[in-house]
Image: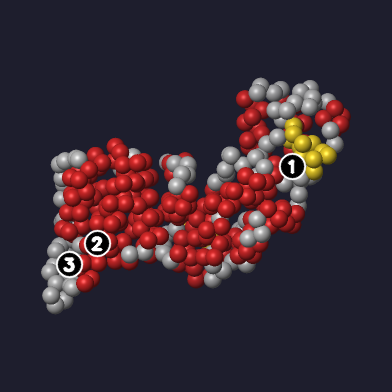
């Protein structure tokens, strides 16, 4: 073991860090007490009021973690005996004891709950361990950038089928971060330095991303006789055609994206000739980028600020690492409560 040295100030006591206690155990109070023992045995004793505040914060974050663990992953209590998990728990306690930042505490709890689900040393466990160390080094602005980048560049909400549901999606997952989005290049440079992402030469317009991920919301439609003209054997099949969302006098293909349309036609055993023709109609009369932007702002006016920050900063050039994805995922999850499992993106 590497020898560690440290110095103390007046009226303080040194306790060597990283001496993690393996516990046996496992009622809720026993797990809680063991978790607090981890903190007491590893956190440097502070002087006076600082010691009292640190202890209160450690107990608060431990209680919040255990309550969320009991709700989301009760099996995770078994990890109380695992030294590596105790190390992750201590990281959470230590960072919250230092800062007392509620948003950071909620974020660390979500990361730690996800970490509790990883029983074997795999890539996801390693990423979550690293995320617990990196997240406290980031500002609220940088955490907001990770959340927005993750949401738009790496996810698709399959429950969005019209403009009202898109608006609800934006309210839940975008609106809370708007005021914290930064155009400052130093924000993105620090994120890259911290291992959360990279600023690439190529860029992705938000309008293009939305127009691809949710293409079905941004179609101008076509006349109903196009289906007959193109000799599509399914005819006006409601599985594939609906009134156009942007012009009720016209028709559009019933799909959110080209990928989902392809999967749907395969599931329905549509013959290849018809698949090609329906796909061609899906790509007919799409809105241009400016029209997509205007439609989004019409649905939610605050989206103007998001488009502005996106186009005028390195946000359009930023790509996430696995650590950036994990932190962005946790930052959204702490607000919305439920989100798809992180293993979808990191496996």
- 55 relative to 249 in the view: left or right: left
Secondary structure of residue under mark 2? helix
The residue nearer to you, when weighing 246 against 233, is 246
The residue under the point 62% across, 64% down is 305
Residue in view at x 31 percent, y 46 percent: 67
Which residue extends farthest bottom? 10
Is residue 49 rendered to the left or right of residue 203?
Answer: left
Q: Which secondary structure, mark 1?
A: loop
**Residue at numbered disc 2:** 56
Closer to the camera: disc 3 or disc 1? 1
Q: Position of residue 221 (x, y in %)?
A: 79, 41
What is the number of the mark on residue 45? 3
Q: Nearer the viewer, mark 1 or mark 2?
A: 2
Q: Mark 1 highlights which residue?
A: 245
Depicted 19 relative to depicted 229: above or below:
below
Q: CA distance from mark 3 to mark 1?
A: 62 Å
Can residue 301 be seen at all in this image of the molecule? Answer: yes
The part of the image, by quadrant, that contains residue 135 is: bottom left
Asked if the residues shown at circle 3 and circle 1 are in contact, with their CB atoms under 8 angstroms apart, the answer is no
């Amino acid at each position: 073991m590497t020898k560690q040295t440290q110095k103390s100030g007046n009226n303080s006591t040194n306790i060597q860090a990283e001496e993690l206690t393996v516990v046996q155990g496992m009622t809720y109070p026993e797990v809680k007490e063991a978790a607090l023992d981890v903190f007491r045995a590893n956190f440097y004793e502070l002087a006076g009021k600082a010691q009292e505040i640190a202890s209160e914060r450690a107990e608060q974050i431990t209680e919040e973690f255990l309550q969320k663990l009991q709700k989301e992953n009760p099996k995770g209590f078994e990890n109380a005996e695992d030294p590596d998990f105790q190390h992750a728990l201590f990281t959470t306690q230590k960072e919250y004891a230092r800062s007392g930042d509620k948003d950071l505490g909620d974020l660390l709890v979500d990361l730690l709950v996800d970490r509790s689900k990883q029983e074997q040393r795999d890539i996801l466990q390693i990423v979550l361990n690293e995320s617990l160390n990196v997240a406290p080094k980031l500002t609220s602005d940088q955490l907001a950038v990770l959340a927005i980048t993750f949401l738009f560049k790496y996810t698709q909400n399959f429950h969005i089928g019209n403009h009202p549901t898109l608006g609800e999606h934006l309210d839940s997952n975008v609106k809370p971060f708007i005021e914290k989005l930064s155009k400052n290049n130093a924000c993105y440079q620090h994120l890259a330095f911290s291992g959360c992402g990279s600023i690439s030469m190529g860029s992705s317009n938000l309008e293009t991303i939305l127009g691809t991920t949710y293409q079905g919301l941004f179609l101008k439609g076509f006349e109903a006789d196009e289906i007959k003209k193109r000799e599509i054997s399914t005819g006006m099949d409601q599985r594939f055609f609906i009134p156009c969302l942007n012009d009720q006098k016209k028709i559009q293909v019933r799909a959110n994206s080209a990928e989902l349309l392809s999967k749907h036609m395969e599931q329905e055993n549509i013959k290849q000739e018809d698949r090609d023709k329906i796909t061609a109609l899906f790509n007919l009369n799409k809105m241009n980028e400016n029209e997509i932007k205007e439609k989004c702002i019409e649905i939610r006016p605050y989206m103007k600020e998001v488009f502005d920050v996106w186009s005028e900063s390195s946000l359009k050039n930023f790509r996430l690492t696995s650590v950036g994805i994990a932190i962005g995922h946790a930052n959204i999850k702490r607000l919305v409560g439920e989100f798809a499992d992180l293993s979808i993106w990191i496996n």
